[in-house]
Image: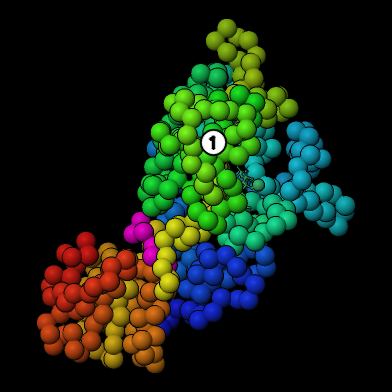
Amino acid sequence: MRQSQLFTKTQKNAPAGEMSLNARLLIRGGFVDKLMAGAYTILPLGLRVMKKIENIIREEMNAIGGQEIFMPSLQPKENWETTGRWKTMDDLYKVKDASDREFALGPTHEEIVSPLAKKFLNSYKDLPFAAYQFQNKFRMELRAKSGILRGREFLMKDLYSFHISQENLDEYYEKAKIAYKNIFDRAGIGEKTYLTFASGGSFSKYSHEFQTETEAGEDIIFVCASCNMAINREIKDEIAHCPECQNHAFHEKKAVEVGNIFKLGTKYSAPFDLTVMNEKGEKVPVIMGCYGIGLQRLMGTIVELSSDENGIIWPESVAPFQVHLISLGKNEGAEKIHKDLQKNNIEVLFDDRDDTSAGAKFADADLIGIPWRVVVSEKSLASGGVEVKKRNEKESEIVEIEKLIEKIK
Ligand code: ATP
Ligand code: MG
């Protein structure tokens, strides 16, 4: 993509009142635009990052047998009354049409996916199965102050699994745990992300959070000094030792919940009378699990973990482009390298602007944070090549044009 054609521009300053690091950098770099607190437009550069994240998640969900669907955001009130959550869920957005009919804007989709499954499930032979989607969620977040980490409207991957027995759910849950670990590893935040026991009765059996250590987080977790499992604040008081390894020492850390997995049991299948015939011909309730990840939250967390005073430093796996090719002055050399990189399927942002100084181009490159910076000038060409620098390294080197592709690949 030619930067001269990109309709968004970088900005020297973030909007006044935007305090969070992730939103400040993402707005300045031209990745997102703030419509209001908790609602952000995803711009071309940001959407490329979101699509990278989405594809990583999709591959891992498909690997555990997830089937992709797409459910409506606009949902009938009756479904929410069936589970009682029309009254009990504080952050539910409710809308009314001209005929006074009421709807929910979906904050999650158990109320939709459970009656959906009921239409297709008859016998134990139809189980297990899992369906997932990438769909906007609406939540009445009253304190939306963490930039894109906490939106009022945000994209979530939500997977729902359906099982004949608790044992079958337990087995699937372990697979989902591994898929989640893979996702956060591949997105470059694995090292700082802790599998965390979450609250709820006999907690460790029902729910886990994936918490990423960052000052921007709104949660507190206690990481076991011995086995690296963590416990969230709500249960910490009830237990004196790590449920995994019995160790007593913990490190307290600020963290953000990037993902959550939950054994629902029959919580939603019961109100919708979602049942199947078991092998003995008896009607039994279906056992469910649910598994969520917020995509803007994941993108924002990556930014919180990976930046310096000049801008973002994207991990290669989610970077909007692999190479930021910068042409200094008009030169045919840069045009040719642009074509060569494209021919080799390397994603390039080509700074071909002829009205912009070298200094401004370098500042933009640092702010946008693409992993490889390649500078082509008359001077570099005269000394036999192009100047190559990685975003996370200080020194650049001259690389022969013939060796550039090989170096980047
Ligand atoms: P939190 O405690 O941060 O409000 P939650 O417990 O409400 O999160 P879940 O209902 O488990 O979150 O949603 C699943 C995932 O969706 C979370 O792990 C997180 O990644 C993401 N998520 C939740 N709320 C938001 C939000 N307001 N903005 C962006 N992502 C969110
Ligand atoms: Mg919440």
Residue visible at 55% across and 57% down? 216
Q: In this view, does 153 lie above or below 211?
A: below
Position in image of residue 249 (x %, y %): 47, 34
Q: Does the magenta stretch include residue 252?
A: no
Residue in the foreground of this view, choosing between 408 and 163: 408
Callout count: 1
Q: In this view, does 131 lie above or below 329?
A: above
Q: Which of the 4 quarters of the picture holds residue 384? A: bottom left
Q: Which amino acid does label 1 sit on?
A: Ile
Is residue 91 in sight in this rendering? yes
Horizontal arrangement in the rendering, residue 72 relative to residue 303 (left or right): right
Which residue, as the protein is rendered here, is positioned at the far right? Answer: 100
Q: In this view, does 353 lie above or below 347?
A: below
Residue visible at 36% across and 90% down? 357
Q: Which quadrant of the figure contains the C terminus?
A: bottom left
Residue visible at 76% across and 45% down? 90
Residue visible at 60% across and 51% down? 218
Position in image of residue 241 (x %, y %): 52, 27
Q: Which quadrant of the figure contains the N terminus?
A: bottom left
- Range of magenta residues: 312-317
Horizontal arrangement in the rendering, residue 277 relative to residue 171 (left or right): right
